[in-house]
Image (tube, rainbow, N blue to C red):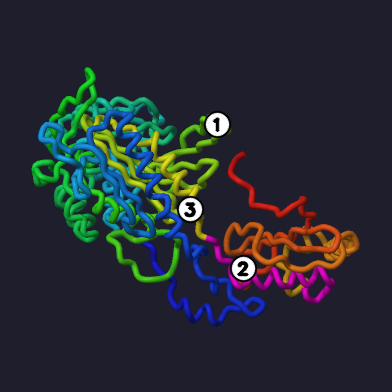
Amino acid sequence: MGYRKPMHRKMLSLALGFLGLAAHAAPPVAFEDPDRRTKLAAAYPEVDRVMREFVARENVPGAAWGIVIDGELAHIGTAGLRDVEGGQPVRGDSVFRIASMTKSFTAMAILKLRDQDKLSLDDPVERHVPELRGLRPLSSDAPRITLRHLLTMSAGFPEDNPWGDQQLGISEQAFSALMRSSIPFSNAPGVAYEYSNYAYAILGRVIGNVSGVPYTRYVEREILRPLGMTSTTLEPRSVPPTRLAQGYRWEDARWKREPQLPDGAFGAMGGMLTSLEDLGRYVGLLLGAWPARDGAENGPVSRASLREMQQMWRARPATVTRDAAGAVQLNASGYGYGLRISQTCDFAHVVAHSGGLPGFGSQMRWLPEYGVGLIAFGNRTYTPWGDVLGPALTALKDSGGLRPRAVQPSGALVEAREQVTALVGRWDDAAIERLAAVNLFLDRDKARRRAEFAQLRAEVGGCRDAGGWVSIENRLRGDWLLRCERGDLIASVTLAPTEPPKVQHLELRRAPPGDPAPARSCP
């Protein structure tokens, strides 16, 4: 089911109160730096430099890239030739094949049908694709493959990138015969990640069967047109020749042209072509789903479903590497719905997908907490954009403008902070009882807490709130600094899941020397 806004929200908010403020009173997370966009713009020349150096170093005939900020394509860059034989340069409106980046459009279409109650993600796939009813399981205890397995690359099918590329243009009849001949398994469904183009081709068939119109027409009608993506298609022949990027491979020290693969039954896994402007709209839609908030739904799919796409639903083993400077880097990654999700030492939530076919390589990558994304197209087989989007993000980070939204505390958390700060100066039994959730004195009784506060007061002397937050994990949990006469304190509060939300966890501890900073994901 889709997201349903709670009824009578305003009335409930007025009725609820905790120390004068309701938990619902806080605004959503927001960017605090008014000069953020100006700072990011100062990094555009450096981003262009690293991109152009990459294009030359990797023998990419032509490339186009863009920076998406707060839902709009804020900057574009181009280099080289879209048509080597004709000597035609890449322009801002050139159309490139984006291959497997198509998968997120397929996932979005599935979620739209789900939100309309036309299917469930836990439906067995053979319910919607009869050709798979005779699929032989890997073992007698293997579960039936569901749509969720297909979405998350956990159906148990073998990785099939080289094979899948060449299935793009096969007919629907040939695809049906292929499914009826069964599919070998490398794993039981639901136990491991393994990338499968076959899985997303099957999802394309599901979309056609459930919606009653072919996959291509459904995606165009329900996603592309509502977003104004007028340059996006699955058929190369529909692109004006003056805009179409031709594909090449680098071989024998020269570029060799690859034929444009036609649209066919495997198009849902990787057939799409698009422009910077169109893909900027699409990435902007996905970025615009963050943060969760009140307000009208303007996209073809609900913001809740868009955020669902961008969560990790099937994990991969984490890796630890060292960068060029020798620093340890942790990368934890997995798959959402048609999107790759990862976490690094620098960014807690990275959403991305690459695309590669004979003649083309592309990537989109964005940071939901930062409202910033990068897109890049190349017309060389499997253009390795992953090697350069990292340095491009570093350039944006070095500008000082790449900072995450700040979580806004609830009114209840702000009021609890004020009351706890007052208790540090002067203990008040009645005040702490009004503040406490039912568990607070069961976990540590009131007399013990009173004694702990008194001991700290004797050690550090008078204290005042330093302002700001040391860390604020969410609207109901935060740490702040108290400046004291003989050493500082950190106060930590977590509110309970009750209305009104009272304090379930309260801790005071000595602050380390210097101003404390929030912990990073890794060293």
Q: Answer left or right for 361 relative to 323.
A: left
The residue that appears at 27% across and 28% down in the rendered structure is: 183
Indicate whether 421 appears above or below 76: below
- Residue extending furthest toward the top: 252
Secondary structure under the numbered disc 1 in the rendered image: loop
Residue located beneath label 2 in the image: 498
**Amino acid at pointer 2:** Thr
The label shown at residue 316 is none
Q: Answer left or right for 446 relative to 386.
A: right
Residue located beneath label 1 in the image: 325
Residue 201 visible from this viewpoint: no
Look at the magenta stretch and give its main secondary structure. Answer: helix
Instruction: Say which of 148 and 64 sits in front.
Output: 64
Where residue 436 appears, as percent x and y from the top left, is 73, 68
Residue located beneath label 3 in the image: 402
The residue that appears at 64% across and 80% down in the rendered structure is: 20
- State yes or no: discs 1 and 2 in contact (Cβ < 8 Å): no
Residues in magenta? 406-431
Residue 507 visible from this viewpoint: yes
Q: Quadrant of the N terminus?
A: bottom left
